[in-house]
Amino acid sequence: MAVLDDLSGFEFEDLMEDVFRNLGYENVRQAERTADEGRDVIMEEIVDGTRRAIIVECKHTGTVGRPVVQKLHSAIATFDFDGPKRGMVATTGRFTNPAEEYADRLQRNDDPFPIELIDGEDLREIADEIGLDLYNGRIEILCDETLRPYDPAADVDAPVQEAFRDIENIEAADLPVPHSQVTFRPVVAITADTNAVFETSVGVIHRINDRTQFVVHAERGHPKVANDDVATLVTENFHATVPLDSGQFTEVFDDVDERRFGQTQTEYKEWAVDRLQDYHTTTVTYTGDNNVTYNKTCEPNLSDISVQSIEPVYLPEVRQTTDLGEYTYPYEYYAAGPSRVTEEDGIHRCVHCETSGVDETYTYCPNCGAIACDTHSKTERLEGEPVCTGCAVTERFALKTKYFYDEQNLEAFREEYAEMPIHEKAMENKLLAGGSVVATLLLVVGLLVIGGII
């Protein structure tokens, strides 16, 4: 275990805390480093429905003798816990024969405070089991599970078809198959408890008793806390993960990309503890015995913060792009089976302005492929179908602008318009013609003047 020799005693305790958490122990935490009292890590386990405390002595040394085991036995007896208790001694080295004999005798005599010994050889086996990187003494993340990238009961492009249902003038049958790609992004779900009491001569002035759960994007770079919607998507679907089989998913998606976890599990734990320490630090105002007002900064110790679990999983980010005419419409979301959180919605968005959102009305232009809001969607005069202002050919007839798909349509209408009687030409400006009799007469007179009749 010489590769761990560069670790300090405190670093070895940090490492063992991570090891025990990965082995399934609960409420794993370190004792106060300023008052060790013979115990370094404290944790709990449930055996036959009964919760039991475990006090662990960590020894980063070559040989551990009987006095260390005896000292731990005394520490277990005085440890305040309402239930059964036992102990462990973990070392990177080995135990002397007297130390092993003492621990064996406790077991044989059914001592109420038995002690388990874990030496360097045992740690090697544990390392293989949980993915411990022996080179730097940190816990690597081993993860081959992902949330489902699509709903197995529907087509992979079902979310895109659903989004296009809100767009007027286009049918699902007219949609081309979108190009689909999935990126499996690593995340970790962290659960941590913070318990701290702050006292002065007047008594307790502040208390923290909080459980925090958050999801962290875990790619390279600084960890970033996911927003509430993404966190809910992850935590509510942990029970429905599937193996991350890139070969299987290439049969469903056009492109598949798998990102790597950017840091070790140990580093995410340290980051979470630092973040929670900052989050819970606050200034408290209180009145002393002398009736003087004081301000005290209450900052929890690192030992007050216990990381209960760090659960890694891959979160699929699906990006589907649909080509319609001159435009490409992206639709991007995090997926968990039929559930999803939309990241980019390029379908509910006008291509000509900043109008966006599912509460607006959009119309598809078959002439150029644009999706446009009401302001930028018009009715083509010759065909009577939608056309957007971005591609329409325009010309004023009487006092109103008309919209056409192209120059051919415009020319066809010019010929049709030239053959219209005066009253039909007047009706081409319905808003004015329908306003009043006087307005209609004025319009007709204007048309007669334009036509050279009067």
Image (spheres, grey):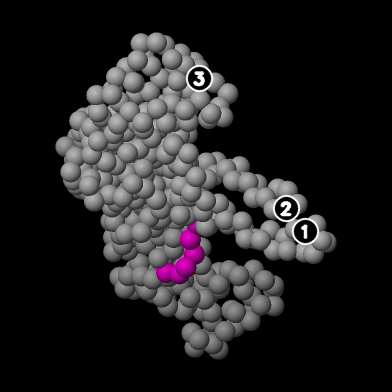
Question: Which element is circle 1 on?
Answer: loop
| Above or below: residue 363 compared with residue 157 | below
Any mark on residue 376, and which?
none
Any mark on residue 288, and which?
1
Q: Amino acid at mark 1?
A: Gly
- Name the chief secondary structure element in magenta: loop
Of callouts 3 and 1, the N-terminal one:
3
Any mark on residue 84, and which?
3
Q: Amino acid at mark 2?
A: Ser
In the image, is residue 353 part of the stretch drawn in magenta?
Answer: yes
Query: Would you say the residues marked 2 and 1 are in contact, meaning their CB atoms lie under 8 Å apart?
Result: yes
Q: Amino acid at mark 3?
A: Pro
Q: Is residue 310 visible?
A: yes
User: Magenta span covers which residues?
Assistant: 352-357
Q: Is residue 160 visible?
A: no
Of callouts 2 and 3, the N-terminal one:
3
Quarter of the image with the N terminus is top left
Q: Nearer the viewer, residue 316 or 416?
A: 316
